[in-house]
Image (tube, grey):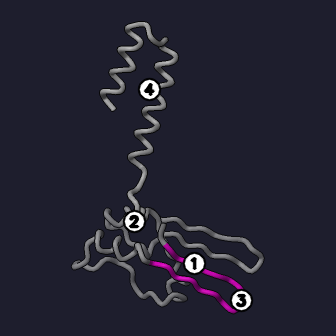
């Protein structure tokens, strides 16, 4: 990309293009580079960034809780973000990290998390990562 940028600047210096055209070319070049960086190779999994909890009431109203997974690196206890009542419904007694678990291990395990709960009242709870 550095060579392409230099070529565009040389074209401006030699009078082949005007600065406005160079600006458009440089912007297009930056966008292309940004797309390359964010594009994922085929077969590679997208990094999960959030723990998502969706609680849907029978009338259709939804409560959303989004927790950045990287908070685990700071040793933040997930139980602060999950209401006690929900923990009991799911059957989770304690989500705190044990001394033998690293946050990377927890993040890797959470990548496959997908819990769907349907209550007799019609309320649904969905816990997943994306």
Question: What residue is shown at x 44% (from left), y 10% (from top)?
Answer: 16
Whether tag 2 and tag 1 are in contact, CB under 8 A, the answer is no
Question: What residue is shown at x 44% (from left), y 44% (from top)?
Answer: 35
Whether tag 3 and tag 2 are in contact, CB under 8 A, the answer is no
**Residue that extends furthest to the bottom in the rendered view of this protein:** 120
Distance from disc 1 to disc 3, alpha carbons, whole Å, reads 15 Å
Give the x, y percent position of residue 127: 53, 76
Which residue matches tag 3?
121
Sort mark 3 into few (<14), some (14-19) or many (20+) by Cα contacts within 10 Å: few
The quadrant in which residue 49 appears is: bottom left
Distance from disc 3 to disc 4, alpha carbons, whole Å, reads 57 Å
Distance from disc 2 to disc 4, alpha carbons, whole Å, reads 31 Å
Which residue matches tag 2?
43
Distance from disc 1 to disc 4, alpha carbons, whole Å, reads 44 Å
Sort mark 2 into few (<14), some (14-19) or many (20+) by Cα contacts within 10 Å: few
Q: Is 36 or 73 nearer to us in this picture?
A: 36
Q: At numbered mark 2, what does the secondary structure look like: helix, strand or loop? A: loop
Q: Earlier in the sequence, mark 1 or mark 3?
A: 3
Give the x, y percent position of residue 72: 35, 67
In the shown orientation, is residue 104 left or right of residue 9?
left
**Residue that extends furthest to the front in the rendered view of this protein:** 16
Q: Earlier in the sequence, mark 3 or mark 2?
A: 2
Q: At numbered mark 1, what does the secondary structure look like: helix, strand or loop? A: strand
Question: What residue is shown at x 63% (from left), y 76% (from top)?
Answer: 55
């Amino acid at each position: 990309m550095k060579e392409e940028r230099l070529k565009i600047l040389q074209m401006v210096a030699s009078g082949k293009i005007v600065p406005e055209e160079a600006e458009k070319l440089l912007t297009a070049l930056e966008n292309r580079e940004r797309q390359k960086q964010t594009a994922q190779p085929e077969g590679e999994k997208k990094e999960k960034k959030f723990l998502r909890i969706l609680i849907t009431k029978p009338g259709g109203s939804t409560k959303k809780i989004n927790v950045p997974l990287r908070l685990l690196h700071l040793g933040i206890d997930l139980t602060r973000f999950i209401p006690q009542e929900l923990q009991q419904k799911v059957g989770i007694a304690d989500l705190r990290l044990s001394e033998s678990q690293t946050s990377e291990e927890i993040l890797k395990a959470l990548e496959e998390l997908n819990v769907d709960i349907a209550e007799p009242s019609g309320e649904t709870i969905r816990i997943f990562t994306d």
